[in-house]
Amino acid sequence: MGFETRIINDVDKSQFLVPRRAFTDPAIFEKEYQAIFNRCWLYLGHASELPEPGNFVTRTVARRPILFTRDRSGEFHALFNACPHRGAMVCRERHGKSPAFMCMYHGWTFGADGHLMTLPGASGYAKGFKQDPQKQMTHVPRLARRGDFFFISFAQDGEDLDTYLADAGDYIDLVSQHSASGMTVVGGTQEYAIRGNWKLLAENSFDGYHAACTHSTYLEYLKNANGALGATPLEGTGIDLKKGHAVIEYGAPWGRPIASWVPLWGEEGKVEIDRIYGELVARLGEARAERLARKNRNMVIFPNLVINDIMAITVRTFFPTAANYMEVNAWALAPKEESEWLRKYRLFNFTEFLGPGGFATPDDVEAIEKCQIGYAVGDTGLYNDISKGMARDGAPSYDDEMQMRAFWIEWERRLTEYEG
Amino acid sequence: MSLTMERTIDEATLLRLQVENLLIREADLLDSWKLDEWLTLYTEDAHYYVPPSDVDGDTASPDTSLFYVIDDRNRMEERVIRLKSQGAHSEWPRSKVRHMVGNVIAHRDDGIIRAKASFMASRAKDITHDIFVGHYLYEIVERDGELKIQKKTCVLDMEALRPHARISIIL
């Protein structure tokens, strides 16, 4: 690897050290774009965001403007949102419904599948100009779905999505099984930024070790709001899902709108939650229903998709624009058929912990930003310690760091492969 | 020669001044981190909301849309308990906060007072200094001869919380 400080992974000494330079060096940051963001499958959006033909969403993925559409026949497309004529961004709205997209610069107009429909002054161009493949909006090289989760890849070739997802695929299926009728992204996006390196948020998203200290005020809140901390202690395991993906699966004292009731929700809530649990058991069997309903899961799909099924379900991506800055988008996912009452409590529950206004995320942001500041002390010979649990016999605990080591090993593998 | 001054004030202007007094008082308490006193400006069934910036914040409902903040009175009190603790790391040491409130419009609507105001809230801490811009939608009621806030919605006139990252202060 081109930078002099590699990850130190010494199983015999139970030592796993990540050079802090990985968080600060602009050259490494640019290499990450080449080796990781231009190669991996990246989350684009959820089918429920385009419920009908003609719907569209614009989104920035790995610094590129993307137009995610559904054409008249209902087929999904991922287009680079730039006009083939002079390069202007074609669709300038965040979301909506439209049969065509007109570039505001010269009026070239494209269909939802990107084909050039009309252009003013066509007689001034050579015959067949309109059909020239170079004059159509460009499709992102690859678009694929796992259930209702759509992913894109900027690489023309490489492994297919299911192979890429490895064991994480079944966890995507699991989060989809909360509902018999399908899951939906609830309206409203939490869009924020963190002044820190993107890999700090990958680590933080499934860090079971930091909760007691970083989130002490949240745990206090749970105790106050519910009369006592719930009967379920924080307890569980970390699971390596291969290819850099990993999850921690654990019990926790907070309520889950999928069948873990807390007193804050009242007696009406208890009846509803019991009904949902009965339906889950009938549909999925006792074992999977129990796991789905009672266990929390914080999953990171390499490099930057987080699906956390905790006090609510959040889907989160984060893309760096510099070594010390990332843009975060977070959505709430919920069963389509959910009652008004439960939807309300789900969103209420989501915001108690998650997001920029929650009782916990701001403190995660504080930790990440303070790490980034701390790295300014110097970059030679300084390492982050990610070894917790290496000396343990048996399965990793949810608050060990196996899941982060899985991320880092894949990160280094991809950078090395790119350079090699 | 005598000079007479008309000292009357029309009802709408009086209402606006009363609401302005309340909003100025609230801003001062928030800027001074007097959060327990801040709570006394609110009714026992109060709500405090901050919608995200990709929905119509004037009409969106926290029952059907993901928000940044969905606080009922109980969670407002818990928010204050949290912000008074050193464990609220993002606000410890406390940030310097300044609310600018203006352009107040108020009218009576079937027993409640609806008010709208523009705000800018500045938060400075460590090496960061962020400014939140938006407008407030208030529902205000009279309780025991005093104006109390029943609902406050902070609609951000921003495209995203970038680079702010967090709404760890009360807007």
Image: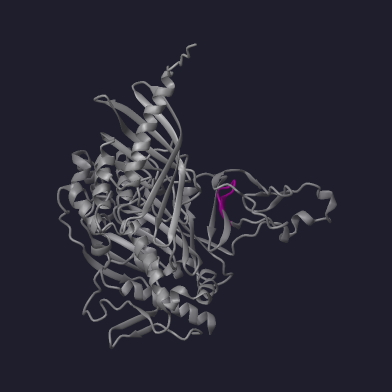
Name, please, the residue furthest toward the front. Answer: B1
The location of residue A379, given as percent across then percent down, is 43, 80
The location of residue A258, given as percent across then percent down, is 28, 50
In front of the other: A396 or A271: A396
Q: Quadrant of residue A386?
A: bottom left
Q: Decide: is A125 above or below B114.
A: below
In front of the other: A390 or A211: A211
Q: Is residue A418 left or right of residue A221?
A: right
Q: Is residue A380 left or right of residue A12?
A: right
- Span shown in magenta: A68-78
Identify the colour scheme used.
one colour
Answer yes or no: is residue A245 visible. no
Q: Is residue B143 magenta?
A: no
Q: Is residue A256 left or right of residue A194?
A: left
The location of residue B153, given as percent across then percent down, is 39, 38
Residue at image x 48%, y 66%?
A161
Residue at image x 55%, y 69%?
A38
In front of the other: A81 or A359: A359
In front of the other: A258 or A14: A14
Q: Quadrant of residue A81?
A: bottom right
The location of residue B109, given as percent across then percent down, is 39, 22
Residue at image x 50%, y 81%?
A417
Q: Quadrant of the C terminus of chain B?
A: top left
Answer yes or no: is residue A364 visible. yes
